[in-house]
Image: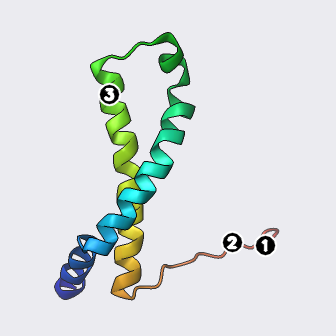
Amino acid sequence: MTKSISLFFKNFFRPETTARAIKVAVAVAPILIWINHFDLIMAQKFTPVFYLKCFLTFFVPYCVSAFSSAQAYSGKKPRIIMVMAGT
């Protein structure tokens, strides 16, 4: 277990993982900021809380992408739960 966690974190901070995650965050975050904070942007209400939320909006896609890449590099297959309708 410790070895797999160590491998996961090693892969999480690989240069390729970081580069890919930054690209994803730069592509996705502005769209999310525009969708989620359109009213504040149009009203030009740029408070410290707004900037914190924008930073976190970049951070989330970065982490999701890095997590996915690290999991793929580690060779782990994601668990898929099948839900059967009507049963």
Secondary-structure class at tag 1: loop
Measure the C-alpha gap from mark 1 to mark 2: 9 Å
Residue 30 vs residue 81: left or right?
A: left
Kindly identify which residue carries mark 1: 87
Nearest the camera: 85 or 57? 57
User: How are the residues colored?
Assistant: rainbow
Q: Alpha-carbon neighbours of circle 3 within 10 Å: few (<14), some, or many (≥20)?
A: few
Of callouts 2 and 3, which one flags the residue occurring earlier in the amino acid sequence? Answer: 3
Secondary-structure class at tag 2: loop
Measure the C-alpha gap from mark 3 to mark 1: 47 Å
Estimate the x, y position of residue 84 in percent, counting from the top left: 74, 73
**Numbered marks: total:** 3
Amino acid at circle 3: Tyr
Measure the C-alpha gap from mark 2 to mark 3: 40 Å
Q: Alpha-carbon neighbours of circle 1 within 10 Å: few (<14), some, or many (≥20)?
A: few
**Label ID, residue 71:** none
Kindly identify which residue carries mark 2: 83
Residue at image location 65% in from the left, 76% down from the top: 82
Of callouts 3 and 1, which one flags the residue occurring earlier in the amino acid sequence? Answer: 3
Q: Is residue 30 above or below residue 18?
A: above
